[in-house]
Amino acid sequence: MIETELRDSTHAWVVELLDESDVSLEDNFLDLGGHSMLALRLNERIADRYGAGLSLRLLFERSLGDAVAELAARLQAA
């Protein structure tokens, strides 16, 4: 399923970008120490692999999992 692959990829990239191993997709990106430049780098990786990126609004306001679920729904609808 695209959502499972997307969740796994996003988790791995967030761990790498934040240099933080204790990351859950239930966490908020900003609360983990993320910022706008890291969000853009994360989104670039996701867009390169999947052809579309996360909603930055959701990434900043909700959990990582919510942002991933929204992108997965868009990709599956396309």
Image (spheres, grey):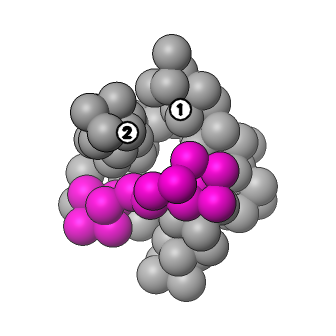
* Magenta region, main secondary structure: helix
The location of residue 18, given as percent across then percent down, is: 68, 62
Residue furthest out toward the front: 78
| Front position among marks 1 and 2 | 2
Between 3 and 51, the residue placed more toward the observer is: 51
Q: Distance between the residues labelled 1 and 2?
A: 13 Å
- Taking the magenta stretch, the answer to whether it contains residue 57 is yes
Q: Residue 59 carries which label?
A: none
Q: Residue at x 59, y 69 (%)?
A: 44
The location of residue 72, given as percent across then percent down, is: 37, 35
- Taking the magenta stretch, the answer to whether it contains residue 70 is no
Residue furthest out toward the bottom: 37
Q: In the image, is 72 to the left or to the right of 35? A: left
Q: Which residue is drawn at 37% across and 39% down?
A: 75
The location of residue 21, given as percent across then percent down, is: 73, 43
Write the start and end of the magenta stretch as one range: 46-59
- Please name the amino acid that badge 1 sits on: Arg
- Please name the amino acid that badge 2 sits on: Leu
Q: In the image, is 69 to the left or to the right of 23? A: left
The answer, for residue 39, to whether it is visible in the render is yes
Sequence-earlier tag: 1 or 2 = 1
Q: What residue did someone put label 1 on?
A: 7
The location of residue 3, given as percent across then percent down, is: 46, 26
SS category of the residue bearing label 2: helix
Q: Quadrant of residue 68?
A: top left
Q: What residue did someone put label 2 on?
A: 75
The quarter of the rendered structure image containing the C terminus is top left
